[in-house]
Image: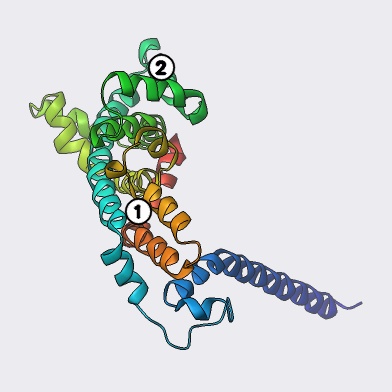
Amino acid sequence: MTGEQILQRQHRRERLADATKKLVCIALVCITLIPFYISVIYSIKYKSEITINHLAWPKNPTLDNYIRVITENEQFLVGLKNSVLTTIPTIFLLMIVCSMAAWVLARNNTRFYSLMYTVMTMGTLIPFQCIMLPLYLNMYKAGLVSTNLGFIIARSGLQVSISILVITSFVKTVPRELEQAAEIDGCGKFATFWQIVFPLLKPINATQLVLNTVYVWNDYNTAVVLLRDKASRTLPLAQIVYFNENTAELNLAFAFFIMAMLPILILYFSLQRYVVSGVMAGAVKG
């Protein structure tokens, strides 16, 4: 076999490998998008069309399902209001507290701070089922069951471990020389953090903004434990109730699902460039 034939065979193998990779990627994308496609087409179909052909695009797409969900069912607006009122404070509380804590933990290498870091990040290893009952009992005794404040406190506490873990790794990539220069100019610890360090945490804070919003907005386990009243339900609870009440009208149920998903999709696509860059930058040194 000549050298030219060997090169041709290698080129064919490389082309075959590239084609196989592309086919696998296309297949994975299709598998991922199929549930979303089904949700969209069901939400714009009339009830009669769903039973005719489940996967076909509707002949007469309609937005009436979305209008009916908003106007005929108060649980959507109640769930949306509660989700907004609990998610936004939780996200900003985590961003402020965890950023400051991560900076302190990253800049101090004593045994005490190492122990504190270990204790604070060990929460990632504890399943929610292990703390579900104690969480409910403590919130009940404090009078915070079925309240937005109780849900904010619980969700903030549950997210602290993973936020500290990620942000601390990122803080270690911030040059200490910048902080030393600020101290020479007369800045105290508080001013150094807010004027020098915190602006440099924009990538990881944007990443945490997206990830924590997804976790809190879509949280069902904590919500079903703490939010017992109808008026305190967030969107995940309202979705389950609405789906159970409308299993005969899947078009309405899926319209509810799509509307509950839209705020998260908009936020993610707006900040997606920070998600990968923030995590990767923190992983380099962490």
Residue sitting at x 26%, y 51%: 78
Q: Residue at 34% across / 77% down in the picture?
A: 63
Name the residue furthest left: 186
Q: Amino acid at mark 2?
A: Ser
Which quarter shows the N terminus? bottom right
- The residue where tag 1 is placed is 274
| Residue at the bottom extreme, as displayed | 59
Using the image, determine if residue 264 lies above or below residue 119.
below
* Location of mark 2 (residue): 114
Residue 22: % across, % down = 63, 71
Q: Quadrant of residue 251?
A: bottom left
Question: Residue at horizontal 32%, vertical 62%?
Answer: 266
Where residue 173 appears, as percent x and y from the top left, is 36, 37
- Observer-nearest residue: 43 or 16? 43
Please tell me which residue lies in front, 92 or 276.
92
Choose between 49 and 215: the one closer to the eye: 49
Location of residue 279 with respect to 54 vertically, above or below: above
The residue most toward the right is: 1
User: Picture quarter containing residue 216?
Assistant: top left
